[in-house]
């Protein structure tokens, strides 16, 4: 976890848990797993247990010590709503986000949309908590149906990354933001430009902010993030920190 981040759409990462299990094709080349497993068995290392699920309660209050307002990606190395994370621990994470009302946003992203839908009514929803689901192809757009039931979230967003195929029908009603990106690293699967343009155009018609993160590839630094000659860095409406509940 870090008070800074190279991820284009956030300022910092916060990991009150580590580790996860694959649930769909977008997980195949998980960067978090690749990184974590490098340190399996290294005594005393934060990832001594590799990518096995591990709660990190000592990290819970970290955002309270960051005084500068930030956008914070919650669990860049895990999924808060995965099986094995106790309901009570998820609530503790949400309680901290509520206490850290000076931050601009806590960006929570999950592939476990069914559990999100089930737990959402029991959780506090401060105005600086954004909730999103990851989808990688048309097959997984049903996760959006679970997301839009979370009526108390200030921002509901989609991470269409890695985009593995065309998505011609993206249900964008009640969605506030869409991120698109290609897979990167060893074995990266290609992303067709027309797949990206199609999502961008759907966002434009629905007046939903569109953020293009990267083309990706084995060496993503060489492919960049220009789409049709420009960067797309649209963000959802800002939520003033003072508005946090």
Image: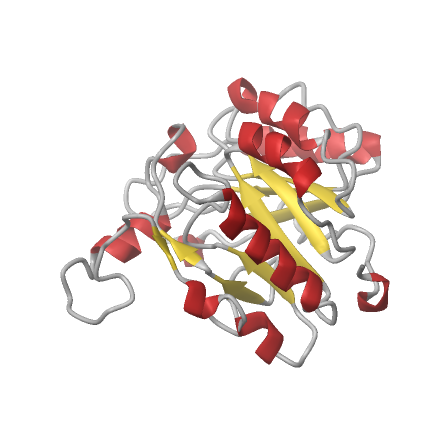
Residue 64 visible to the viewer: yes
Query: Residue 207 in the image: x percent, y percent?
Result: 84, 37
Total numbered labels: 0
Q: Nearer the viewer, residue 95 or 73?
A: 95
Location of residue 142 by image quarter: top right
Is residue 17 shown above or below 64? above
In this image, 185 relative to 15: left or right?
left
Q: Nearer the viewer, residue 23 or 189?
A: 23
Q: Residue sitting at 47 percent across and 34 percent down?
A: 191
Residue 1 visible to the viewer: no
Location of residue 217 by image quarter: top left
Q: Residue sitting at 33 percent across and 35 percent down?
A: 28
By what rule are the colours in the image chosen?
secondary structure
In this image, 230 relative to 236: left or right?
left
Query: Residue 224 in the image: x percent, y percent?
Result: 51, 54
Position of the N terminus by quadrant: bottom left
Location of residue 242 by image quarter: bottom right
Query: Residue 130 in the image: x percent, y percent?
Result: 69, 50
Query: Residue 99 in the image: x percent, y percent?
Result: 69, 67
Is residue 55 shown above or below 162? below
Identify the residue at the far front of this view: 88
In this image, 221 relative to 177: left or right?
left
Q: Residue sitting at 21 percent across and 71 percent down?
A: 44
Position of the C terminus by quadrant: bottom right
Q: Nearer the viewer, residue 236 or 45?
A: 45
């Amino acid at each position: 976890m870090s008070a800074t981040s190279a991820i284009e759409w956030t300022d910092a990462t916060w990991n009150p848990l580590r580790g996860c299990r694959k649930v769909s094709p977008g997980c195949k080349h998980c960067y978090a797993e690749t990184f974590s497993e490098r340190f399996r068995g290294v005594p005393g290392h934060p990832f001594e247990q590799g990518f096995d699920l591990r709660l990190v309660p000592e990290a819970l209050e970290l955002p309270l010590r960051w005084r500068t307002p930030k956008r914070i990606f919650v669990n860049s190395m895990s999924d808060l709503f995965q099986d094995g994370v106790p309901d009570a621990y998820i609530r503790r994470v949400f309680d901290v986000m509520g206490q850290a009302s000076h931050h601009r946003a806590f960006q929570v992203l999950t592939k476990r949309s069914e559990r999100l839908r089930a737990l959402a009514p029991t959780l506090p929803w401060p105005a600086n908590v954004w909730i999103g689901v990851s989808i990688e192809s048309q097959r997984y757009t049903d996760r959006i149906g679970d997301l839009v039931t979370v009526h108390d979230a200030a921002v509901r967003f989609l991470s269409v990354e890695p985009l593995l195929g065309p998505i011609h029908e993206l249900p964008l009603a009640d969605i506030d933001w869409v991120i698109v990106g290609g897979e990167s690293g060893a074995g990266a699967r290609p992303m067709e430009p027309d797949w990206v343009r199609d999502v961008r155009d759907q966002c434009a018609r629905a007046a939903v902010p569109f953020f293009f993160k990267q083309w990706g590839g084995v060496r993503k630094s060489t492919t960049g993030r220009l789409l049709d000659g420009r960067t797309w860095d649209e963000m959802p409406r800002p939520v003033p920190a003072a508005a946090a509940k």
